[in-house]
Each structure stands twice: as structure tokens, then as C-alpha cells.
Image (spheres, rainbow, N blue to C red):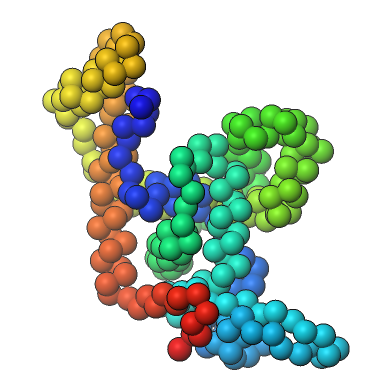
Amino acid sequence: MSVTGHRTMRAAGLAVVLALAMLRGPVCAGQTANGQGAGAQGTGSRAQGTGKASASATGESVTLDRVAAIVNGDLILESDVEAESRFAAFQPFNEAKPVSRDELVDRLIDRAVILQQMALQPEPPITDAQVDAELATLRKAIPKCAAYHCETDPGWQKFVADQGFTLGEVEERWRQRMEVLRFIEERFRMGIRIEQAQIDDYYRKTMLPAYKKENMTAPAEASIASRIQEILLQQQVDKLLDDWLASLRAQGSVNILKPGEEAP
């Protein structure tokens, strides 16, 4: 086990939820259970969420999307779950084990709750220049990108297309990721203080045993104190975030549908 592997994270990947925060698929962005959301197309979205085939105006059979969950009236569709799975390719450090559908749905529910809270306190959008700068770094960090030569525009475009996205979709998803991280930073990191005794304790009880297990000589505590402080800070943020999301879920209305179950 590597030293960095000692960072504690929620099983469903709350830290990854934030790191991968992204827009919902175009079918349901802003769509509500009654079909009146900003992104709703037509009327009667509950009937459209059954996943059954229907006839289009031209007589062709069209497979409709299914509702996976309803979060305070906002729909999460099966297409969102599928896109969430595919977008993991843009995470430089993917989870070691496959993520189940239930975990993906749980991730999307948490994200929906965060986005709903963000809408109550809107902030200026992240600029195109900021997004471009982060994506430039991302293109160098994704291991699978090496084979595509993502440092070149054609290579990056090919990688993005092979994951089933357009460049515009990736840019907007990453913009929202940055906005969510900013929201969490401002809400939870302020006021958290890590004492030197906590750093000492983590170095002695966690870092030293980890290096010993790998038969490596541990660096001096002073040289990695800032890294330990960041780990401890993230642990506290994760705990505060978990508690906050659990409270919002309890106060709101979250309905998770089983595969094949129709929306109420």
C-alpha cells in the first residue's frame, strides 16, 4: 500500500464525486419530475422516463430514457449513470475496483444535492481560460492519454471521442467540477485548523508504518509536514461534507428507482 493510499475517503468516493463533478446528460439537465424544468423537452417527463419504445412522428421506434432517481424533483436518468461511468476515463487516478451502478447513482444524488445548494448562492462562472488551463494539465496526467498523444489537439480529440463525449461536453463538465470544488472549499475548509500535534501523530502512527511496510526509509517529518496537513484537512472536509449531505438528504425528497421500475 502506498503512502498516499492512506487518505481516507468515503466508500462511494465522495472525494471522487467532487473531483469528477460534471454536468448531467443533455436529456435531463435541469429537468424536473413534472417536466417543467429548464431542460425539459415537451411535457410529461414521467411518462418519458419509462424506457419503453414509442412511435415518433415519422413512425420510427424510439427507445426512451429511464429514470434512475428523483432528487427534490430533479431527475437522474439512466443515461446520466452511463455517462458517469464513461467519464471516469478522465480521472487520472481511477478507483482500483469497478464502481457499481448503485454507487454511481449514489454519487449522482450527492452531486444533485450539491448543485441544488449551489443554485441558492450563485457564484461567477469559472472562466474559459481557467478551464483550458486545468484541461491542459489533465491531458498530461491521464495515463491512457499517452497512447493517444493527448498533448496534441488531434490526439486529445480522438481520446475524448473514444470515451463518447465531445470537446464541448468535456469542457462544460470540467467547468462544473471546478465550480463544485470552489463551493466545497469556501463552505468547509474555512475555519478548520490542523494542530502540530495532529501532524506529529499522523506521521508517527500512519506514515512511518507505511514506509516500513514498503521497506523504505521515511523522509523527515518536516519535509512532508505540509502534505500531512493537507491529508488531515481533507479528512475533516470529507467528514463535514458527509454529515452535511446526509442532513440535506434527510430533509429533502430522494427516490431511488430500481432498474425497470417506473417513476411514481
| Quarter in which the C terminus is drawn | bottom left
User: Looking at the picture, how far across and down is residue 108, in whole percent?
Assistant: 47, 62
Left of 70 or right of it: where is 159? right
User: Looking at the picture, how far across and down is residue 259, in whole percent?
Assistant: 50, 75
User: Looking at the picture, how far across and down is residue 203, in whole percent?
Assistant: 22, 21
| Quarter in which the N terminus is drawn | top left
- In the displayed structure, would residue 73 be above or below residue 226? below
Furthest-right residue in this view: 58
Q: Nearer the viewer, residue 221 or 132?
A: 221
Q: Quadrant of residue 5?
A: top left
- In the displayed structure, would residue 6 be above or below residue 248? above
* Residue displayed at 63% across by 39% down: 135
* Residue displayed at 71% across by 88% down: 54
- In the displayed structure, would residue 248 be above or below residue 215? below
* Residue displayed at 27% across by 72% down: 250
Left of 94 or right of it: where is 184? left
Q: Nearer the viewer, residue 36 or 121?
A: 36
Left of 173 or right of it: where is 100? left
* Residue 195 visible in rendering: yes
